Image (spheres, helix red, strand yellow):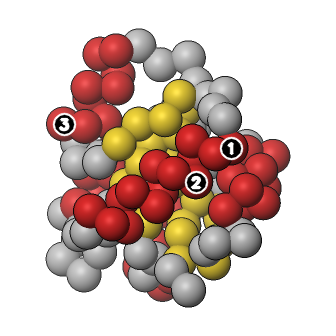
Amino acid sequence: MQKIAIIDDFEESCQLMSEILSPYFECSYICQAEKALNFVKTLNPDLILMDYKMPFVTGVELCKAIKETADIKKIPIIFVSGAVTSEERIETLEAGGDDFLAKPFHPKELVLRVQKRFKDY
């Protein structure tokens, strides 16, 4: 089963995405962005779902750090965030993000976007 790492500072968001995706994928999450890089290195997931706005380390900073780390840089990243401007969405793509899903989202859309990423890689 493919592994997904979920990184969001709100545990409720992590739990919701995990609940939606767990029938199809093995999901693990962390709610502390400053510890997420080590979490990703240890878990070595097949895909990362990440919030844009988090305290201490932004999603963009974390995405750049992941993309600069040899053994995890090829992991696709889907940003999942609310209240983000088009400039901020562009910033996530420029940082190495592969997709962006706005909150609130339809559960089926989350599943389909994740499945599509696995088909594309």
The residue depicted at 25 percent of the width and 37 percent of the height is 93
Identify the amino acid type marked 1: Pro
Q: Do the residues labelled 2 and 1 touch (CB within 8 Å)?
A: yes
Identify the amino acid type marked 3: Glu
Query: How packed is label 3: few (under 14 Cα within 10 Å), some, or many (20 or more)?
Result: few
Q: How far apart are marks 3 and 2 (CA)?
A: 24 Å
The residue depicted at 54 percent of the width and 69 percent of the height is 4
Lower sequence index among marks 3 and 2: 3
Going by the image, does 35 lie left or right of 86? right
Which sits in the foreground, 112 or 105?
112
Identify the amino acid type marked 2: Val
Instruction: Find disc 2 in the rendering and name its residue.
Output: 111
Image: 92 above or below 31: above
Lower sequence index among marks 1 and 3: 3
Instruction: Find disc 1 in the rendering and name its residue.
Output: 107
* Label placed on residue 94: 3
Examine the rendering and report whether any part of residue 98 can be seen.
Answer: yes
Q: Do the residues labelled 1 and 3 touch (CB within 8 Å)?
A: no
The residue depicted at 29 percent of the width and 16 percent of the height is 87
| Label 1 SS | helix
Query: Residue 21's spot in the image, x, y percent?
Result: 67, 62
Query: Residue 34's spot in the image, x, y percent?
Result: 52, 56
Q: Distance between the residues labelled 2 and 1?
A: 6 Å
Which quarter shows the N terminus? bottom right
Going by the image, does 77 lie left or right of 26? left
Examine the rendering and report whether any part of residue 56 can be seen.
Answer: no
Which sits in the foreground, 1 or 10?
1
Query: Residue 33's spot in the image, x, y percent?
Result: 54, 53
| Label 2 SS | helix
